[in-house]
């Protein structure tokens, strides 16, 4: 931990030896005060250091400070309904609740899920392509559902060719207070594995350089965002930024409507995979992000 911290806890020279004290003798309440200033992974790492931090790391008040303010609402989505499920959730410690919410919690027949980003405890969300309204999705001349391990939902929608391209979605959810970004996770080209190696076919990629794709986002409390950009990143998954929104009222559900479209019917477009729509805390970017020309308005 470094000389400065060591001298702080152990003292220096013969005095420390005579006292025979160490970090393990730190009062648990003092250790908990240290942990309150750390992120979740740092708490878990420090808990392995000695018995004082190990004991403090199990304290409910430490983990409740790391949970989002609406964690009681969020834990209600966890599997195990009925009275027994409610009793089990009431008995759970705050550390256990944090750990459970850090794993994906599915809802709406498995087409949507949310989880806590482990470092800061912020809510993230994903909606599968099957949760979206996609023009022509039931016509196999245009679209197919392609199984893949590259999607958290194990399936993506692949477009061969279409004139009218439009994808629309809705979400009604109680977000913790904060600012969030909404993305479409898109892949240009059809990918597969051959002899253990990932290969990508550009056979059907066309039309995306003719006109930009238009992304829109609106909320039930009057926030609106509009952006547009050309799709020109073949061969890899990219997050296309549709816009940002602010959740400002704790405990109140916010309804989102969002879309991506390229409906100029003077040309066809194809060769596109749609995996999901993602909602992340603003600034959290685990993958490559493309942001187009953006116009945002808030009431």
Image (tube, rainbow, N blue to C red):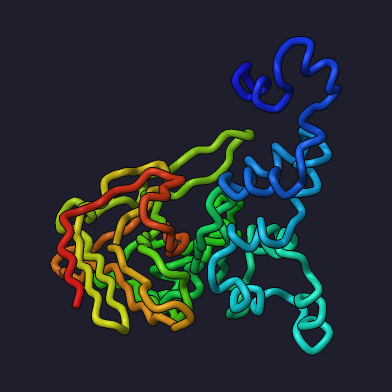
Tell me which residue sits at (25%, 72%) in the image.
164
Residue 47 in the figure: left or right of residue 62: right
Query: What x and y, as percent, mark residue 143?
Result: 43, 67
* Depth check, front residue: 132 or 165: 132
Give the mark count: 0
Q: For the C terminus, which image quadrant?
A: bottom left
Observer-nearest of 71 and 63: 63
Q: Is residue 182 visible in the rendered structure shown here?
A: no
State the residue in front, 228 or 219: 219
User: Which residue, as the protein is rendered here, is positioned at the far bottom?
Assistant: 83
Instruction: Establish if 259 lies above or below 252.
Output: above
Figure quadrant of the N terminus: top right
Occupied quadrant, residue 166: bottom left
Q: Residue at x 63, y 34 (%)?
A: 196
- Residue 93: x and y in percent read 76, 65
Q: Position of residue 14 (x, y in %)?
A: 79, 11
Indicate the quadrant where residue 197 lies: top right
Residue furthest top as drawn = 13
117 versus 201 height, above or below: below
Specify whether 15 is left or right of 230: right
103 vs 165: above or below: above
Task: Locate residue 257 relative to residue 145 in the image: left or right.
Answer: left
Q: Residue 115: image x %, image y %?
A: 58, 62
Is residue 71 visible in the rendered structure shown here? yes
Q: Residue at x 32, y 55 (%)?
A: 240
Question: At 46% from the left edge and 63% from the top edge, which residue is drawn?
Answer: 276
Question: In this image, 255 relative to 6: left or right?
Answer: left
């Amino acid at each position: 931990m470094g000389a400065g911290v060591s001298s702080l806890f152990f003292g220096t020279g013969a005095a420390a030896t005579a006292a025979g004290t160490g970090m393990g003798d730190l009062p648990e309440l003092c250790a908990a005060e240290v942990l309150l200033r750390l992120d979740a992974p740092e708490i878990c790492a420090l808990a392995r250091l000695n018995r004082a931090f190990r004991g403090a790391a199990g304290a409910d008040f430490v983990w409740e400070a790391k949970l989002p303010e609406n964690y009681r609402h969020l834990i209600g989505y966890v599997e195990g309904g009925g009275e027994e499920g409610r009793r089990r959730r009431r008995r759970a410690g705050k550390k256990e609740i944090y750990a459970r919410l850090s794993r994906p919690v599915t809802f709406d027949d498995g087409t949507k899920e949310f989880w806590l980003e482990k470092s800061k405890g912020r809510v993230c969300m994903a909606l599968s392509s099957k949760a979206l309204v996609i023009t022509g999705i039931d016509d196999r001349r245009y679209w197919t559902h392609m199984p893949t391990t590259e999607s958290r939902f194990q399936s993506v929608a692949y477009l061969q060719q279409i004139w009218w391209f439009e994808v629309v979605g809705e979400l009604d959810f109680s977000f913790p207070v904060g600012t969030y970004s909404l993305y479409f996770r898109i892949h240009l080209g059809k990918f597969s594995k051959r002899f253990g190696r990932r290969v990508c076919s550009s056979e059907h990629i066309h039309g995306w350089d003719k006109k930009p794709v238009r992304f829109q986002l609106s909320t039930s409390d009057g926030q609106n965002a509009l952006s547009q950009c050309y799709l020109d990143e073949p061969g890899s998954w990219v997050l296309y930024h549709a816009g940002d929104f602010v959740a400002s009222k704790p405990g109140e559900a916010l309804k989102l409507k969002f879309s991506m479209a390229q409906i100029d019917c003077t040309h066809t477009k194809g060769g596109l995979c749609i995996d999901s729509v993602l909602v992340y805390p603003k600034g959290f970017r685990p993958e490559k992000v493309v942001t187009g020309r953006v116009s945002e308005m808030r009431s």
